[in-house]
Amino acid sequence: MHMSHLAPSSDSSAAQAPILSLDKITKSFPGVKALDGVDLHLYPGEVTALIGENGAGKSTVVKTLTGIYQPDGGRIIMDGQPVHFLAPQDAADAGVTAIHQETVLFDELTVAENVFIGHAPKTRFGLIDTKAMHLRTAEILTLIGANIDAGVKLKDLGIASRHLVAIARALSIEARVVIMDEPTAALSQTEIEELYELVDTLKAQGKAILFISHKFDEIFRIADRYTVFRDGQFVGDGKIADVQESDLVQMMVGRAVEQLFPKRHAEIGAEVLKVVGYSHPTEFEDINFTLRQGEILGFYGLVGAGRSEFMQSLIGITRPSKGAARIDDKVRVIRSPADAIKAGIVYVPEDRGKQGAILDMPIFQNVTLPSLNKTSRDGFLRLAEEFALAREYTERLDLRAASLDTNVGALSGGNQQKVVIAKWLATQPRVIILDEPTKGIDIGSKAAVHDFMSELASQGLSVIMVSSEIPEVLGMSDRVIVMREGRMVAELEGAELSPETLVRHAVGIQVEGDAA
Amino acid sequence: MSYLKSREAILFGAIGCLLLVVATRFPGFVAPQNLVAVFTDTSPLMILAVGQMAVILTRCIDLSVAANLALTGMVCAMINVAAPDLPVAVILAVSIAMGAMLGAINGILVWKLSIPPIVVTLGTMTIFRGIIFLLTEGKWINAHEMSPHFTGFPRADILGMSVLGWIAVVVSVVMIVAMSRTSLGRSIYAVGGNPHAAVYTGIDVGKTQFAAFVISGMLAGLTGYLWVARYSVAYVDIAGGFELDVVAACVIGGVSIAGGAGTVAGTLLGALFLGVVKNALPVVDISPFWQLAISGAAIIIAVAFNAQSGRSKGRVILKSAEHAQ
């Protein structure tokens, strides 16, 4: 591990030369230096993990490598020669391909058409050679172990299959460098394992892989090398075998993070929420649990287990077919999110971009949106009271912004998340539901979110945390409910809580004679 | 925010330049009483445009405003013919109530049946005009059939400006307050800015869109009476095609067709810009066809401007830059 701007040190320059290197790349946007002289080397047959907090410049690097952005300074070197990617097509021609965080696919086209869009094989009359396209798609799908028919329309596929199509698309050009930008974010545990196998296949074919991820277990599982960026600057690189998790964390945040999941003791009080027999015709069935004051209740399960669907029903977005919710031992009928807010249940959705904040609105207006009855008098909004409320709750979350008048769209992802949470705390809820609260956010912000969750609980708020990350579930929850295929399959507490038990319940493996 | 302010500044500058150019050829145009006349002439457009703005902010569009105006105007004229002594206050109340009702029809169809607003209002636009024909069998109601207080009201002079102009001022002030200082105004921006987030926040998206259609309808109804009284005539085709001018005023004024962004001040300036073009070109001997070309060019420039500003919204990546925003 070295922490300088030097080229790869002797220990990391193996016999082979990198396929692709970035040499002192800089990229500025008006008023912002996104990349400040960063280096990156991608070697054939190796996985390089690019690590950094949100805003470290990872996405900008991906866009530079794929020709979407042109660097202001520095060089991109491929096979020892400087190259210029002036357009995405140039990068594709050079064999650089990316599987993006949110891949753009076309619902109304078939799998084969999606895979070959833009570079479909042609007949001698210049028309698309459908037969060849289907054959090659089937080949690629077999290669990545995907059992998908090349002829079906994309809209008929599930999330995981779509992801495989995206990967197939990336491989359909003769790729030498494959960029994976948080590829596991939307995948379940089994799918992630399949992806790892795919990565191994690609490595065996001598492709260089750039792997961007927030998950350390993942990085240590599949990466050979690492490169760390911080605030648009290169911090260090080296071989994964030579570092500890804590070293990487320290390089990323520039400070030592003592504990990632600082659960503090909270006084568990009286029962606040009791859910009895909640069912939905197609999404979930017979959900029963209680939640007490100061408690953090984890909801674990694979993606698609029905956790978010249940939560959305609990706050009145969808209607349950039967079941009741009691708050403070009173039955509350929740037919809309407004009812839920009144009853004291708030939901912080997973997709903060789509469901969380209103980007074109200033911070203070976002925060006060569900509390406008509190900040208005005689039907008119009081700006001073709005600002006071917004200031109180953003300060509690240590939100750093020049002014509460700043539009939320101008904030970083982590700060947008804080605005969304501040908005809900300002309603003074009894129960707060956090759906994947740390998904896709950097490790520093993650620790802050966890710390904050603990604080909420210790102040007497009851927290429901939907999470797919086992360390987070184990570290934060007082109790864990595991869901599988729309049903509650386990309620675990204390000594019963272990990674193995959670996964076993979530995937439905019964190990005979195993009491744990 | 700063961008919107600058949009308003640009429009203000554009209107100023236009006046300056016209003044070099025809100095009388910028005389105060003529400017007041231009303002009064543009008042119906301004009133309709601020209503339309509320609708567009919620990601909808109201193409039926001109037809609503014509139908409500005709009904007001018919009431006046039937009961010539009815005071203007009653006529005003009727026009607003009826406009609101017609707007509510649009709103209900969008809210409860989830029909795309452009389809709903395209339909009601035709239906409203059709109803006028059924009511009148195509006959006109002319000046001599209307009572003097009915036609005189919008033209009455208060402090050098007609009542019509003052109504535009009052409507503007009410809309500025409603959009910035009431929960409904805030909800309208929220629904257009991010409907998904609005749902989670406890805002009923459909109901908010309904409210926006009612506002737009109310103002269209009010304008209906004022229009018929001012021109002292009512027939099927009054204000034909005017809905496009109204949408144009919003777009030029910086209201985003994608919803969620736009201000009352910008919309008013957009309407005034069109009003000045319409009134200025004839006096400097430019063909009315140029008028259409200039309005059209202004719309395209405005939209291009919107697209450009959307594109240049750079990401904030460095921590240090966040504070500089």
Image (cartoon, coloured by chain):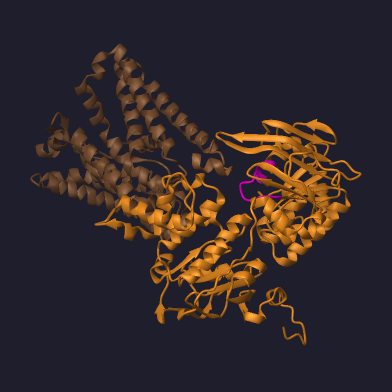
Is residue B67 one of those drawn in magenta?
no
Q: Taking A61 as reference, is A284 above or below it?
A: below
Would residue A350 be visible to someone looking at this image?
Answer: no
Q: Is residue A241 left or right of residue A493?
A: right
Q: Position of residue A487 (x, y in %)?
A: 61, 77
A304 vs A269, nearest the viewer: A269
Q: Is residue B208 left or right of residue A378?
A: right
Chain letter tied to orange: A
Residue farthest right in this picture: A15
Q: Position of residue B195 (x, y in %)?
A: 46, 54
Chain letter tied to brown: B
B107 vs A51, nearest the viewer: A51
Residue farthest left in this picture: B85
Is residue A60 one of those drawn in magenta?
yes
Q: Is residue B78 left or right of residue A380?
A: left
Give the residue displayed 15% in from the left and 34% down from the top: B143
Q: Position of residue A45 (x, y in %)?
A: 86, 49
Q: Within the image, what quadrant is residue A288 found in? A: bottom right
Give the residue displayed 23% in from the left and 52% down from the top: B97
Q: Position of residue A78 (x, y in %)?
A: 82, 36
Which residues, given as a range, are shown in magenta?
A51-61
Would residue A285 be visible to someone looking at this image?
Answer: yes
B163 vs A288, nearest the viewer: A288
Q: Taking A499 as reference, is A32 above or below it?
A: above
- Which quarter shows the C terminus of chain A? bottom right
Give the residue displayed 69% in from the left and 77% down from the top: A505
Q: Taking A398 as reference, is B315 above or below it?
A: above
